Image: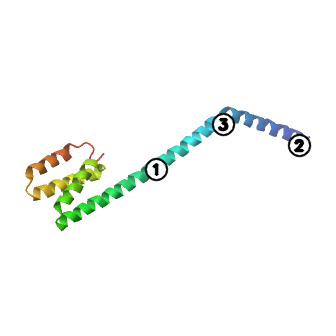
Amino acid sequence: MVDIFKEVEEDLRRSQLQALWSKYGRFVIAALLGIVLAVGGNQYWQYHTRTTQAKESVVFSNALEEAQSGDRDAALAALDDLRQNGSSGYRGLAGLKEAALLADGGEIEQAIRIYEAVAADSRVND
């Protein structure tokens, strides 16, 4: 007799669970899919940011080496490109180094313009 009540109770629970799943199953799947997509998107963004910063680091380091080895024009070109197109941190560093190289070369007015542009750039240190 106890087994019959147990079976009826299990069938009742199963039918209630099936009713809940048929009513809310799509929402559960959509929520889980949204979580997976959000985590995947976040991981991709972190990867993209790290690789971009690594590339900019290499460009900045090479520009510094070119400046020290005497290839000032190549260093200025690389720093100018990084100042205009780089991410926030390297944008500011490249501008400051470019202006310093110009000032050392006697091009004071152009160096001042770059210093002012770096100071006014709202994208630096975002």
Numbered tag placed on residue 3 in the rendering: 2
In the picture, measured across the screen, residue 50 lies left or right of residue 8, that is left
Sooner in the amino-acid sequence: mark 2 or mark 1: 2
Query: Alpha-carbon neighbours of circle 2 within 10 Å: few (<14), some, or many (≥20)?
Result: few
In the picture, measured across the screen, residue 74 lies left or right of residue 107, that is right
Q: Quadrant of the C terminus?
A: top left
Tell me the distance, in whole angstroms, between the alpha carbons under discs 1 and 3: 29 Å
Mark 1 residue element: helix
Q: Position of residue 93 (x, y in %)?
A: 23, 54
Disc 3 residue type?
Gly
Looking at the picture, tell me which residue is in the foreground, 117 or 77. Answer: 77
User: Relative to 92, is 12 above or below?
Assistant: above
Looking at the picture, tell me which residue is in the foreground, 55 or 41. Answer: 55
Disc 2 residue type?
Asp
Q: Position of residue 46 (x, y in %)?
A: 42, 51
**Residue behind mark 1:** 44
In the picture, measured across the screen, residue 6 lies left or right of residue 113, that is right
Query: Alpha-carbon neighbours of circle 1 within 10 Å: few (<14), some, or many (≥20)?
Result: few
**Residue behind mark 3:** 25
Tell me the distance, in whole angstroms, between the alpha carbons under discs 2 and 3: 31 Å
Disc 1 residue type?
Tyr
Mark 2 residue element: helix
Mark 3 residue element: helix
